[in-house]
Image: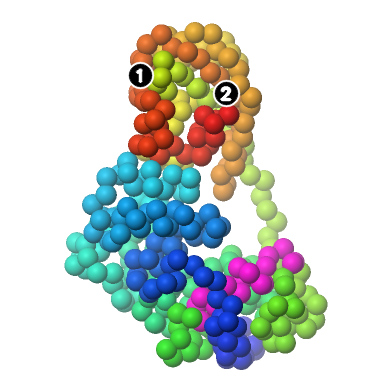
């Protein structure tokens, strides 16, 4: 890490960013709320997916006090489809802390930003540098990949110790008055040029002549990658229950995967039709014949659901823990996780 002269990348990277920066809605100002919101939304989500969510969210909740005061159901509905609902809940918790402890103004100090719910080193660094011009690197997987290739660093880009050392090395070369641009230039380089999986666009890279991996043709070897563990698979049986114009929902338990969110009634295991009917009876549901629907699957970050699906018409809107809602209300008032939402669309 110490052998590479990180100072040499600053000028060419800033010049490239000045000419090639992506035109993104959250870059049209340096309002901390806008920077923060975009960074939370962008975690493990593509930019083109985030843009309409970002614009809709700000239209509904234009500032931190309105976010702090938002009704949870409306908040979750604005987030529907982005997944990782714990993030938007932490977003609101942080907004309430900002209102209670900072007078509704986003704190400028890195440590105070880092202390807010749902904010880690990367997000704190991004907000601090972009919104407040502080020399605080924001090192994520993209930036770690860029650095590992530039200096041929034999490290796992996800290793927290490696990211901490890289943060220190970059902090020492942050350009005065250009901290936000430098942070975003590294982001853009990793997102659009120094691509993962051994397919970087080196001919378009402003640092090609400064990159040891490019000089030696070793781009595919960096960063080091740990062997991926098999993703666990969980069988579930899901029910599409209708009574007239209403559909049954069931709130998931607090904590754990999709905790506290509304979903379709479901249970663990791949039940046969007879076992599925028995399960519905335990809920107090009087259902007609169950119709088997095509099996489905949904992949979360660390888990795969394989879903056995049954549909049935019910004699009455009843059942323990069930809430019967119209499809119109389902579209406008309830945030349904994608795993369930896609079953309704089949």
Label 2 sits on a secondary structure element that is strand
Point out the tag, 2 or 1, that comes first from the N-terminus: 2
Residue 82 lies in magenta, yes or no? Answer: no
The colour scheme used here is rainbow
The quadrant where residue 34 appears: bottom left
**Residue 9 x, y percent position in the rendering:** 60, 87
Rate crowding at label 1 as few (under 14), some (14 to 19) or many (20 or more) other CA atoms within 10 Å: few
Query: Residue at the location (39% across, 73% down)?
Result: 29
Q: Which residue is mark 2?
A: 309
Q: CA distance from mark 2 to mark 1?
A: 20 Å
In the displayed structure, would residue 127 be above or below residue 337?
below
Foreground disc of the pair 2, 1: 2
Q: Which residue is mark 1?
A: 320
In the displayed structure, would residue 106 be above or below residue 259?
below
Side (left or right) of 320 relative to 13? left
Q: Nearer the viewer, residue 63 or 266?
A: 63
């Amino acid at each position: 890490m110490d052998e590479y002269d990180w100072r040499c990348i600053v000028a060419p990277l800033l010049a490239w960013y000045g000419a090639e920066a992506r035109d993104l809605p959250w870059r049209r100002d340096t309002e901390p709320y806008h920077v923060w919101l975009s960074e939370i939304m962008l975690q493990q989500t593509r930019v083109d997916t985030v843009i309409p969510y970002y614009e809709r969210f700000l239209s509904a909740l234009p500032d931190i006090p309105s976010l702090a005061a938002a009704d949870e159901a409306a908040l979750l509905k604005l987030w529907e489809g982005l997944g990782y609902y714990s993030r938007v809940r932490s977003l609101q918790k942080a907004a309430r802390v900002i209102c209670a402890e900072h007078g509704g103004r986003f704190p400028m100090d890195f440590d105070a930003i880092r202390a807010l719910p749902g904010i880690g080193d990367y997000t704190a660094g991004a907000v601090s540098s972009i919104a407040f011009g502080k020399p605080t690197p924001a090192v994520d997987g993209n930036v770690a990949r860029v650095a590992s290739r530039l200096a041929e660093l034999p490290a796992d880009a996800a290793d927290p110790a490696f990211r901490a050392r890289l943060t220190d090395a970059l902090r020492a070369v942050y350009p005065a008055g250009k901290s936000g641009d430098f942070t975003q230039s590294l982001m853009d380089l990793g997102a659009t040029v120094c691509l993962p999986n051994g397919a970087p666009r080196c001919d378009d890279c402003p640092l090609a002549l400064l990159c040891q991996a490019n000089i030696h043709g070793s781009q595919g070897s960096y960063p080091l990658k740990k062997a991926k563990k098999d993703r666990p698979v969980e069988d579930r049986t899901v029910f599409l229950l209708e009574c007239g114009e209403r559909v049954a929902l069931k709130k998931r338990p607090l904590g754990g995967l999709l905790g506290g969110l509304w979903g379709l009634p479901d249970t663990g295991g791949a039940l046969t039709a007879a076992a599925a009917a028995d399960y519905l009876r335990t809920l107090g549901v009087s259902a007609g014949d169950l119709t088997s629907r095509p099996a489905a699957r949904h992949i979360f970050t660390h888990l795969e659901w394989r879903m056995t699906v049954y549909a049935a018409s019910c004699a009455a809107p009843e059942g323990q823990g069930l809430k019967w809602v119209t499809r119109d209300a389902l579209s406008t008032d309830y945030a349904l996780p994608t795993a369930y939402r896609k079953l309704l669309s089949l």
